[in-house]
Amino acid sequence: MPTPLTLSASLLASSLRGWRGSAAFRPRTRQPEQPLRLYEYEASPYCRLVREALTELDLDALILPCPQGGLRFRPEVEAKGGKQQFPYLVDPNTGRDLYESADIINYLSQTYGGRQRAATGLRRGAAVGGAFLASCTRTNLRGFRGYSARPSQAPAQPLELFSFESSPYSRPVREVLCELELPYLLRNTAKARWEDMGPPSLRRKLFPKLPVEGRNRLRLLELTGKVQVPYLADANTGKAMYESDYIIRYLERQYGA
């Protein structure tokens, strides 16, 4: 379960990346008709860069976790692309398959109309280095969180997770989903206004009447009456819940071996 120490480490991980993957201020992206499919694993610094871009471009994706030792989705990547390398993006809307985080980020921006571009040169090295350091903060007795597969039961349908990349509360949930190789539709719930940045308690104090903006933030408000992440919905059981500790307990009980 997430502890204060775990959440502090998650907070540090987001800080080391300068809180990239928090906001999508008035994105000009168009939504793909069919969900993008991203094969990745949570601890990979290269996958982290793609997930940050998805948040900032306000794009949803079907996440197919491929932790080390995983047998559920890693063979699919090798069969499609010829090697087990991650991240690997499959876009059923255009028929394009891509390796390499920089190529994926540029493709997403060019195809769906965003302003995001992959860093190059020294900026690229700094981005990868920061992403690696962020992963180093996320360790336990088994090693990196979100790195190695654990036995689990596969759900009949993908789960649905409202999250955004830098959320320190959502990250522990994504790590467990990855380790258990549970596919999920990632609903990127990026912040859509600068006033929405920062801790919720401070935000409520400074901007008590701040209207909700953002595609999935409005969707979450309509579904549940409030905006908070993470929020997990499981069509296989009809269960839905907030709070990372409840979600992790549910995932371990329902799908863990």
Image (spheres, rainbow, N blue to C red):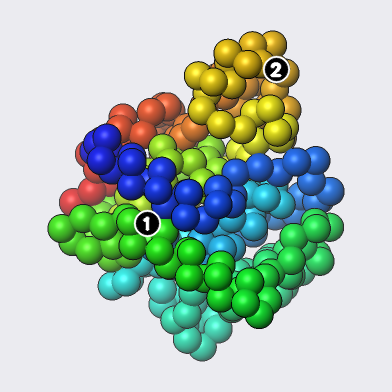
**Measured from the top left, where is residue 257 in percent x and y?**
18, 51
Residue that appears at 58% across and 13% down: 205
Residue type at tag 1: Cys
User: Residue beneath label 2, please?
Assistant: 210
What distance separates the C-alpha of mark 1 from that of mark 2?
34 Å
Residue that appears at 56% across and 67% down: 127
Quadrant location of the N terminus in the rendered image:
top left
Label 2 element class: loop
- Mark 1 residue crowding within 10 angstroms, few (<14) / some (14–19) / many (20+): many
Vertical placement of residue 128 versus 193, above or below = below
Residue type at tag 2: Leu
Residue with the most extreme left position: 141
Of mark 1 and mark 2, the one earlier in the sequence is 1
Q: Is residue 223 left or right of residue 134?
A: right
User: Residue beneath label 1, please?
Assistant: 178
* Residue 185 appears in the picture as rendered: no
